Image (spheres, rainbow, N blue to C red):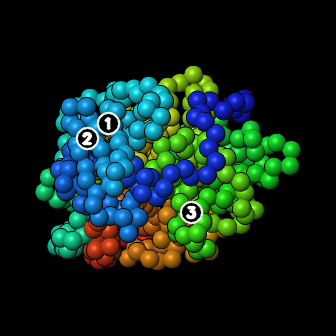
Amino acid sequence: MRKRFFPLVVLLLGPAVGQPVGTPAELGLAGYAKVLCSAVFVSMRDPAEAFHNSGYWMMPNDQQDGITYVVDRERKLVHVTRGGITRTAKFHGDQGCIIQTQDGKGIHFTPLPVTSRLPDAASEPWPMGDQPSKDTTNIDRARLAKAVDLAFADPQGLTAAFLVVYKGQIVAERYMPGITKDTQLESWSMGKSLTATLFALLVKDGVYRLEDAVPVPEWHAPGDPRAAIRIVDLMHMSSGLRFIATQDPDYKPSMGYADHWYVYTGAVDAFQYSISRPLQFPPNTEGRYRNCDPLTIGWLIKQAVTGRGEEYLTYPQRALFDRIGIRRQVLETDPYGNFLLTGYDYGTARNWARLGMLYLQDGIWRGERILPEGWAKFVSTPAPAWKKHNYGGLFWVNGDGGWNLPKTAYLANGAGGQTTFVIPSHNLVVVRMGHFRGDRAGMKDLNRALGELIAAVPSTGTAN
């Protein structure tokens, strides 16, 4: 009999949350502290460099002067201050950095170590390990080299990593000074695609189905219109939940601090905040990039994992990462122990390449089906409620031809220039990562590099 899971209670939730609490300056400083803390203690970057290139963007534009910071390496704390207001983030080992709540308790869960069962990566060949690929591929080496050079052409682009996998082999790999293949880099919304992947494991287990109504108990009270939201609507970011985001076409500053940022900076229970949102549009009628949808998918993951008695904080490592050669990926949480995979996630370029390979191989890894049959096609198919045909199932798709790639290409995409492209038509996975301040220049370089790369690689002759 196919297993089903319908949670009857909400597990391990923080207090009920209504609207954003705190001034934009207070919340911005909290986000600044978290990003700087992760840069220092997770990515091992220089504090001054990270302060300038990564932390700044969570502050309002008119309040970015006069900010100071203190890194307490002994207690693994980062304090960021402006105008007498200080916010703090603390490093919690394998859960990374977490904003300290203002109630003096810091966090409301017990961090856990996350360990891999895999042997030393140096002892195994790629992709299960890091021994060099035996490159026997047919590729234009001169154009490939030019593509790599183009990815790093403008120093203002702050490209940290560029990696190309062709036919399962690493054929190009370069890092900026100070960054290596082992550096856990800010990945931002590429974590949404990781959420899709973790959720796929539960779909394959028969725990959930895409067409199911979302089993949030509150949504199924009599007369609640949210009862009509299906899991597939969440996956398509088309739930219709009201969740203010600055990228909304009708956003106005008078709407207040955006929910999109509040789940990062508010030190609240992000899952509870997301599932408590009211409906704004009928489900599957309006595609909008809103963090509430992938966070609700994250809530479903947590309910399933804890509901069957498994440890939630270690679930990604044992259920996915160990199976595809990833020994460490830092998945940060809110203060209540919920993964904030909408943006607070850190991984190496090689880690993301492995995830891309899993999709390029239609969810099969070394002969074992890990993702449900058809899952790669689902996430890479444009969602019906999105007008530009550029979003799929927690992956972006190149349906509008915005990238110098075939329209069948799709990608995990994160703020600040984090991208993992899956290009089935050319048997390619391409990873580009960088520091946030270089986003605009870096993306211009990347698109030029992709055009050169496609010219260097023969097509498979098929659209998929």
Identify the residue at image location x=14%, y=52%: 178
Identify the residue at image location x=29%, y=64%: 65
- Report the Cα–Cα distance between label 3 and label 1: 30 Å
Is 279 left, or right, of 80 in this rendering?
right
- Residue identified by numbered label 2: 41
Circles 1 and 2: CB atoms closer than 8 Å? yes
Q: Secondary structure at mark 3?
A: loop
Disc nearer the start of the sequence (3/1): 1
- Report the Cα–Cα distance between label 2 and label 3: 32 Å
Q: Nearer the viewer, residue 212 or 62?
A: 62
Residue 43 in the image: above or below residue 63: above
Disc nearer the start of the sequence (2/3): 2
- Residue identified by numbered label 3: 256
Circles 2 and 3: CB atoms closer than 8 Å? no
Q: Nearer the viewer, residue 139 or 323?
A: 323
Q: Residues within 10 Å of mark 2 (few under 14, many from 20)?
A: many
Residue type for callout 1: Phe
- Residue identified by numbered label 1: 91
Q: Secondary structure at mark 1?
A: strand
Residue type for callout 2: Phe
Which quadrant holds the N terminus?
Answer: top right
Is 210 left, or right, of 331 in this rendering?
right
The image quadrant of residue 96 is: top left
Q: Secondary structure at mark 2?
A: helix
Query: Picture coordinates of residue 340 (x, y %)?
Result: 47, 45
The label nearer to you, 2 versus 3, is: 3
Identify the residue at image location x=44%, y=30%: 105
Answer yes or no: is residue 65 visible.
yes
